Image (spheres, rainbow, N blue to C red):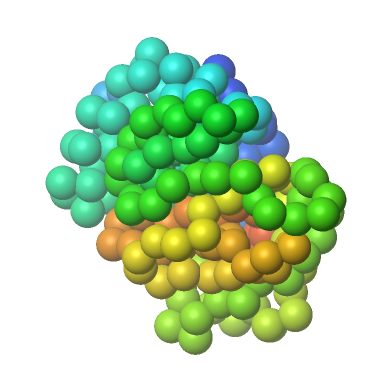
Amino acid sequence: MTTVVVLDYGSGNLRSAQRALERVGADVTVTSDASAAVEADGLVVPGVGAFAACMAGLRGVGAADVLTARLRDERPVLGICVGMQVLFDAGVEHGVESAGLGVLPGRVEALRAPVRPHMGWNTVEAPKESALFAGLDAGTRFYFVHSYAVHETSGLVARTTHGEPFVSAVERGAVSATQFHPEKSGDAGAALLENWLKTV
């Protein structure tokens, strides 16, 4: 059975992520232990709330070293919501810029939309070669809750529109990330997580 660590750094829907991954067949541990996070087959970085606060929590558990070790060996990582955002170079909230983990190129900035947060179900325009979205119809909806987003990055990029297009998922080497919450997205989210497990 595939082992997955959900990284506990004081932020995120840890138990709902754990249950969603167990539902699709993973052996899941929720922990802040760095060695377990490095050694697991897959690592999930969840996250809710403010970018800077999440980064402080991640620094507290040595997440940068964990990610460096995993990516050196091309071991899969999945970031979810703010757990996706912190993988980028920087995040700007309320005019204050905070350094991110720098795993993915790009900046997290306020979503330019008439209504924020972007909350609820929305579709994702994914590239045909995406592993995450394999077998999912173009009109499949996922659950979003966020006010900030990345607008440009590199890799296989999926986009969603709320006021403007933004990056709703990215796949780049061993790193996968979603701005939406697969663990809150019902059968569609389960299918995406199952697809990710196939890459682990």
Residue 72 lies, in percent from the top left, at 16, 46
Nearer to us in this view, 12 or 188: 12
Please identify the quarter of the rendering in which residue 86 is found. top left
In this rendered view, identify the residue nearer to me: 200 or 161: 161
Q: Residue furthest front?
A: 95
Residue at point 40% right, 38% down? 90
Quadrant for the C terminus in the image: bottom left
Residue sitting at 38 percent across and 34 percent down?
A: 100
Which corner quadrant of the image does residue 139 belong to? bottom right
Identified at 68% across, 54% down, the residue is 112
Q: Where is residue 84 in the image (x, y as percent from the top left)?
A: 50, 45
What percent of the width, then of the height, locates residue 74?
Answer: 22, 53
Residue, far left = 72
Nearest to the observer: residue 24 or residue 173: 173
Q: Is residue 120 left or right of residue 33?
A: right
Please give left or right for residue 118 compared with residue 157 in the image. right
Visible residue check, residue 194: no
Residue sitting at the far bottom: 128
Inspect this view and state whether residue 117 appears.
yes
Above or below 162: residue 86: above
Q: Residue at x 24, y 42 (%)?
A: 70
